[in-house]
Image (tube, helix red, strand yellow):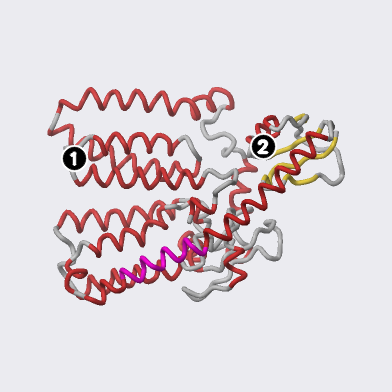
Amino acid sequence: VAIKTNTRTFMADGFSYQLVLIAFSSLVMFIHDEKKLLPLATFFSAWLLLAGTKFSNLIVFSVLGLICIFYLIKLLRKNLSIIPITILFIIIAIIILWIPYGKNYVTYGSPIYPSNQSFAKNDLVSQNIPHNIRDSNKLELLFYGIYSKAQKASASDSPDNIAIVKIPLTTSFEEIFIATNFNGRVGSEGVLFSGIFSLSILIFILSIFRYKHIFINYKHFLLTHFILIVFVFTSLLNPTPNVLRYVPFIYLLPILVIITLSNSQSYQKSKLTRAMCVIVAMLFILNIALKFGPTIYARDKEMKAQNYLLTSMRESKQIYQVYTKSFYSSYIILEEHDVKFVKSKKLLCKNPHSMWAMFTTYYCPQ
C-alpha cells in the first residue's frame, strides 16, 4: 500500500518502505542464523541506502543499526576471522554516509540541513497534524493515524484538516478515492487497515491465552516480542506518528503476527486460528486491491496535469521566479524540462501559483 500510494510522485516513501522490508527481513535472517553472512551483507546495503534516502528514516536506521551492532559484537567474540570484513563494512559506511551528511555539515553547518531550520521543524508539526489532535500525545497520534478515515488533500489551515475516527473494516466509495492522497495525515494505510491491525492483535492475544506454548522455542518467543516492541517504539519516536508513511514498521506488525501464528502450535491445533489468519491475509489483499486502481488513476491524472504545466511554462519562453521551502528537487525538475527560471527567496507577484504535485513550490512570471 505504501509503495503503490507513492507511485509516480516526488515522494521517496515507497522506496524507503521497500528498504525497510529488505533491511528488517535480512536482519531477522542474520539473527536467526549468525553463521550466514549473506543476510548481513544484504542488511548492510539496505541499511545504508535507508539512511541516505530520507531524514525520517534515521530513527529506523538507528534502531536497526544498534540491533545489528549488538549481534556483530556477539559474533566477533566467537569468530575473530570476520574482523576484516567488519572493518571493510565500516569504511564503506563512512564513505557512503559522508556523501549526504558530511557534505551538508561542511556546506551548511549541520548534517541534517534543512531539517534543522526552524521553519522545517514547525512545518513538520503544523503541516502534518490535523487541527483536532494537535495537543495529543504520540500514542494518541498513532491511534488516530491508524483508526481515522482517509483524509483528502487539503491545506494545513483548511477546515477539512481534521481526523475523524471510524469503525474498523467500514468504508465508502468516496473514502476509497480519497485514500489515494499520498500525503495523507491520517488513514493513509488503506481503507481496511484499521480492521486488519485490530484483528491481528486480537488473534495474537487470544492465541497466547489459549495456547501457553504458542512459540516454537524460547528464542522464538524473545525475538517475536522484541521485534513487536521495536515496531511500536520506533513509531512513537517519530514527531508525527499519525502520518503512517513516516512509520513504516506499523504496516509490518500484522504481517509479523500472521507469520508468528502460522508457525505456532495454535495454528496447528486450532481451526479458528487458521481461519482467522486466512481472513486477515485476504483482507490484506483486498486492501491493496482497493488502493491499486484508484491510485493509478489519481497519479496518472496528476502527472498529466504536471506535464502540461511544465510544457506550458517551457513554451511560453518566459522567465519565472520560483520559490521552494524544502523540496529543492523542484529546481531539478524545472531544469530537466528546460523551463527558464530564477531561484527566489521572495516572490514579487501578488498571487503566486503552486506547482501541481509540488505543494511547497511556488512560481510567478518575472
Magenta part mainly helix, strand or loop? Answer: helix
Q: Kindly identify the residue that appears in the image at 48 percent across and 59 percent down.
A: 138
Q: Answer whether residue 142 is magenta in the image.
A: no
Q: Is 107 located above or below residue 169 in the figure? A: above
Q: Which mark is residue 227?
A: none
Give coordinates of residue 81: x percent, y percent. 15, 25
Give coordinates of residue 359: x percent, y percent. 68, 47
Instruction: Please state which amino acid type lies under the numbered disc 1.
Output: Glu
Question: For residue 339, which quarter of the picture?
Answer: top right
In the picture of the structure, the residue carrying the numbered disc 2 is 330
Instruction: Please state which amino acid type lies under the numbered disc 2.
Output: Ser
Secondary structure under the numbered disc 1 in the rendered image = loop
Q: Is 131 located above or below residue 168 in the figure? A: above
| 219 sits left or right of 98 in the view | left
Residue extent of the magenta highlight: 277-290
Gap in Å between the C-alphas at discs 2 and 1? 44 Å
Question: For residue 173, which quarter of the picture?
Answer: bottom right
Q: Kindly identify the residue that appears in the image at 63 percent across and 39 percent down.
A: 327
| 318 sits left or right of 217 in the view | right
Secondary structure under the numbered disc 2 in the rendered image = helix
Give coordinates of residue 115: x percent, y percent. 57, 39
Q: Kindly identify the residue that appears in the image at 51 percent across and 47 percent down.
A: 13
Q: Quadrant of the C terminus?
A: top right
Q: Number of labelled discs?
A: 2
In the picture of the structure, the residue carrying the numbered disc 1 is 34
| 242 sits left or right of 18 in the view | right
- Crowding at label 1, few (<14), some or many (≥20) Cα neighbours within 10 Å? some
Q: Is 340 located above or below residue 280 in the figure? A: above
Q: Earlier in the sequence, mark 2 or mark 1?
A: 1
